[in-house]
């Protein structure tokens, strides 16, 4: 029998946050997103040599630690992810010898959903 509610280790109660009513949700989602993308980044790093050999300069789409495809632009990778998986977290990264970290603050801070 599956565990329900607080008996289930995956279930977490959101607690009020000083950041306001959405603060707790944002903190929970931030941790969840980091965990998901961390697994995808580990996959990317462990397969980087092969990705460089076959897809250097392309944008790769990785989901559930599986290579989905390589694309000429991040937009093509993103559109493929939307069409294939819907609106869920996916990992898109340019295959380059040097790693660069790109941040989109409006997404990570929740400003897109804030109606600004």
Image: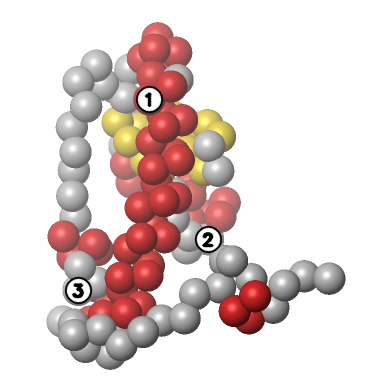
Q: Which mark is residue 45?
A: 1
Q: Secondary structure at mark 3?
A: loop
Residues at marks 1 and 3 touching, judged by CB atoms closer than 8 Å: no
CA distance separating discs 1 and 3: 30 Å
Q: Which mark is residue 111?
A: 3
Q: Is residue 23 visible?
A: yes
Q: Is residue 76 visible?
A: no
Q: Secondary structure at mark 1?
A: helix
| Quadrant of residue 31 within the rendered picture | bottom left
Q: Looking at the image, is mark 1 or mark 3 nearer the viewer? A: 1
Label 3: how many Cα within 10 Å (few below 14, some 14–19, many 20+)? few
Asked if 31 appears above or below 23 in the picture, the reply is: above
Q: Earlier in the sequence, mark 1 or mark 3?
A: 1
Q: Residue furthest right?
A: 1
- Residue located 59% across and 66% down the image: 9
Q: Residue furthest top?
A: 53
Q: Residue furthest front?
A: 7
Q: Which mark is residue 86?
A: 2
Q: In front: 115, or 15?
A: 15
Which quadrant: the C terminus?
A: bottom left
Percent x, y of residue 85? 56, 55
Percent x, y of residue 6? 59, 79
- Residue located 26% across and 21% down the image: 96
């Amino acid at each position: 029998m599956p565990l329900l509610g607080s008996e289930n280790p995956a279930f977490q109660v959101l607690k009020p946050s000083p950041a306001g009513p959405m603060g707790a949700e944002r903190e929970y989602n931030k941790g969840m997103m980091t965990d998901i993308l961390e697994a995808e980044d580990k996959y990317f790093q462990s397969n980087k040599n092969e990705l460089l050999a076959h897809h250097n300069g392309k944008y790769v789409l990785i989901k559930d630690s599986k290579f989905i495809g390589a694309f000429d632009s991040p937009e093509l990778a993103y559109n493929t992810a939307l069409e294939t998986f819907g609106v869920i977290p996916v990992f898109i990264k340019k295959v380059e010898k040097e790693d660069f970290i790109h941040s989109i603050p409006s997404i990570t801070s929740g400003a897109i959903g804030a109606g600004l």
